């Protein structure tokens, strides 16, 4: 807030809003959402707040970077309703999600490290379905054999949107270009790591958005940074929340 507040001091909405670059309407909205305790009213109906409200707002602002707006709102609402155990459960859920995000990042990095060059297949290497390799790409049989999987598995991945081979205009066979092979190999590594298709889909989408594996390295570094920032933000938010709980007591 920029100044020391006395416990009996009365504050206007603008006094709370000014310290966080908010509008007075935002402060009123936060009160209505349960983020702030109910304000007292003057005889003329104007809201008056206390240093406890200022601390609640500071706590919410500190929670948002680590937990997100929705979870932070639920945490503050639970605290203000006196259901502290529910607030702690929500915090545990956020930490569990951060842990799962870290595991996903580690799985992606492990999969990328394991992407060794594929051994070339023979001209007659067909393991079902479509024809062997031809000009401009690889057909499903040779690719399945080189990955050590069944052609049906590649079709399943295609149905899930994880690989997107084109169809040969003359024969109708699936044709996997270099990017398709890359995606199939990455899916294969992640599946070996125990990840479900629905968990893999957003990672493949990120690889495509990055334009391949090499640009993805920068994205992975950024991913690391964002996870670390979330962890630090959770620590800062927890400190503010603990102070708010003590103030309420």
Image (spheres, helix red, strand yellow):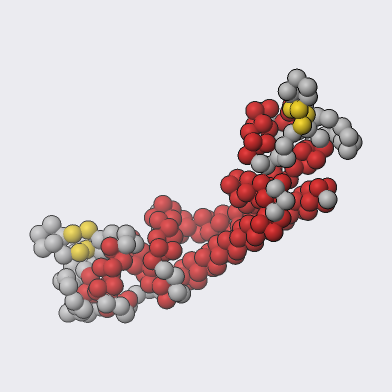
Asked if residue 3 can be seen in this view, the reply is: yes
Residue found at the far front of this picture = 43
Indicate the quadrant where residue 178 lies.
Answer: bottom left
Identify the image quadrant of residue 59.
top right
Q: Nearer the viewer, residue 183 or 89?
A: 89
Residue in view at x 67 percent, y 42 percent = 35
Q: How many marks?
A: 0
Q: Image point 67% across, 55% down: which residue?
A: 87
Compared to residue 134, the image places residue 51 above or below, namely: above
Q: Position of residue 102 (x, y in %)?
A: 57, 64
Q: With 108 as the anchor, is 236 left or right in this view?
A: right
Nearest the viewer among 232 and 3 is: 3
Q: Position of residue 103 (x, y in %)?
A: 55, 67
Task: Indicate the position of residue 225 as horizontal and vertical percent values.
Answer: 61, 55
Which quarter of the picture shows residue 224? bottom right
Q: Quadrant of the N terminus?
A: top right
The answer to which of 146 and 150 lies nearer the viewer is: 150
User: Is residue 137 depicted above or below 69 in this figure?
Assistant: below
**Residue 157 drawn above or below residue 209:** below
Q: Residue drawn at (10%, 59%), measured in percent from left and top?
A: 170
User: Residue 19 at x, y = what percent?
Assistant: 76, 33
Farthest residue to the left: give it: 170
Q: Residue at x 38, y 66 (%)?
A: 197
Residue 190 appears in the figure? no
107 relative to 38, above or below: below
Q: In the depicted view, which residue is nearer to us: 205 or 132?
A: 205
Left/right of residue 248 with respect to residue 144 in the rendered view: right
């Amino acid at each position: 807030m920029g100044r020391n507040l006395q416990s009996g001091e009365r504050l206007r909405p603008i006094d709370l809003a000014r310290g966080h670059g908010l509008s007075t309407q935002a402060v009123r909205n936060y009160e209505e959402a349960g983020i702030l305790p109910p304000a007292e009213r003057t005889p003329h109906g104007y809201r008056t707040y206390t240093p406890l409200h200022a601390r609640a707002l500071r706590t919410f602002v500190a929670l948002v970077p680590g937990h997100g707006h929705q979870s932070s709102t639920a945490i503050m609402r639970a605290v203000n309703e006196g259901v502290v155990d529910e607030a702690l459960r929500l915090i545990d859920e956020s930490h569990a999600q951060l842990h799962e995000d870290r595991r996903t990042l580690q799985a992606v990095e492990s999969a990328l490290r394991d992407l060794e060059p594929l051994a070339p297949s023979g001209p007659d290497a067909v393991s079902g379905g479509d024809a062997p390799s031809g000009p401009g790409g690889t057909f499903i049989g040779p690719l399945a054999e080189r990955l050590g999987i069944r052609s049906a598995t590649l079709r399943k991945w295609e149905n899930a949107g994880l690989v997107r081979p084109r169809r040969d205009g003359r024969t109708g066979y699936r044709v996997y270009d270099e990017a398709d092979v890359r995606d199939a190999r990455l899916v294969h590594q992640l599946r070996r790591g125990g990840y479900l298709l629905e968990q893999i889909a957003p990672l493949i989408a990120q690889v495509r958005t990055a334009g391949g594996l090499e640009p993805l390295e920068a994205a992975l570094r950024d991913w690391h940074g964002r996870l670390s920032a979330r962890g630090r933000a959770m620590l800062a938010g927890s400190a503010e929340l603990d102070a708010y709980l003590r103030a309420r007591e």
